[in-house]
Image (spheres, rainbow, N blue to C red):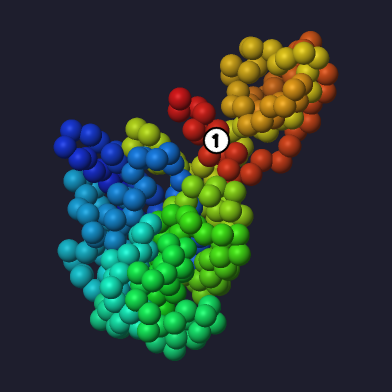
Amino acid sequence: MILEVKDLSKSFESERVLDKLSFNLEDGQIHGLVGRNGSGKTTLLKILVDILNMDEGSLKILGKSYKEDRHIIENIAYLPDRFDYFDYDSILKIKDYYKILYPNFDDNFFKIELKKNKIDGKKTLRSFSKGYKNLIGLLAIIASNARIVLLDEILDGMDVLNKELIISYILDMKDQGRTVLASSHELEELAKIVDVCLYLTKDGKIRNISKSKNSFIKVQIVVKDKLDEAILNHSVLRFNMGRVYVILLENKDNIRNILDENKTIVQYDILDSKIEDSFYWEKGRSK
């Protein structure tokens, strides 16, 4: 593992936002971080990059804490959800700031990618849209050559083409053996590329929902009139149109017998589940 978190907790005044989180980030993998608004995703990312202090717990990067070795910050780079800290600086000036913090900054890569994306390095950051600011920030983060990359809502404000471009850059980092942790509300897009998906619950806990796919099944059901309340009340509804339902059900040994014997069901099919289904399963169970 390249990053290890044990029993991490954080409160703001009397509110516990993160409660004894323990998880690892593995080398060369893309990790997704999902959760409801206000669940603490941004707070967690800021703690990992030492912008915020944790109240309790431990964090180690390459086996060392920030207190043991301040230079480990060179191994981790963070792109916030709004890349506007340098609004009045030119893009090329921003590059110089990153070179101070990251001694292995790839100047050549940064300039080539700016040109490829038709970004004028002499312009100030404030002259670009939010989507382009995120792209410029990502290029700086990639050029840093940090082994761990933290991305906060990187797809927010992006059009379809730029989303595809961002995803291709993230996949390139994986090919280079780098570790990515990306938070996003764009579950469908994120699900296409992540190896591991971490879910922050509203009570401040964290779950690896990549492992939860075996705990439920995804079923498409056609009913005579409407779905039996006994089934609906013990499922997570994903879709309903008329007499057709798509639901998530706990994967019990007798689940097929329950469906076979239910008189309201005309036909059912077991569907392949996706990572976003795991998110909705965890979200539905936590209500």
Closest to the observer, 250 or 98: 98
Q: Report whether residue 20 is seen.
A: no
Q: Report whether residue 154 is seen.
A: yes
Q: Quadrant of residue 181?
A: bottom left
Q: Quadrant of residue 235?
A: top right
Q: Residue at x 29, y 61 (%)?
A: 49
> Which image quarter holds the N terminus?
bottom left
Q: Residues within 10 Å of mark 1 (few under 14, many from 20)?
A: some
Residue 80 placed where, x, y %?
35, 60
Query: In the displayed structure, would residue 22 be above or below residue 202?
Result: below
Residue 259 placed where, x, y %?
74, 19
Q: Residue at x 19, y 66 (%)?
A: 68
Question: What kind of residue is marked 1?
Answer: Tyr
- How many numbered circles does the render carry? 1
Q: Residue at x 23, y 34 (%)?
A: 15
Closest to the observer, 151 or 194: 151
Left or right of 271, for residue 100: left
Residue under label 1: 280
Left or right of 101, for residue 143: right
Q: Residue at x 47, y 79 (%)?
A: 119
Of helix, strand and loop, which one carries label 1? helix
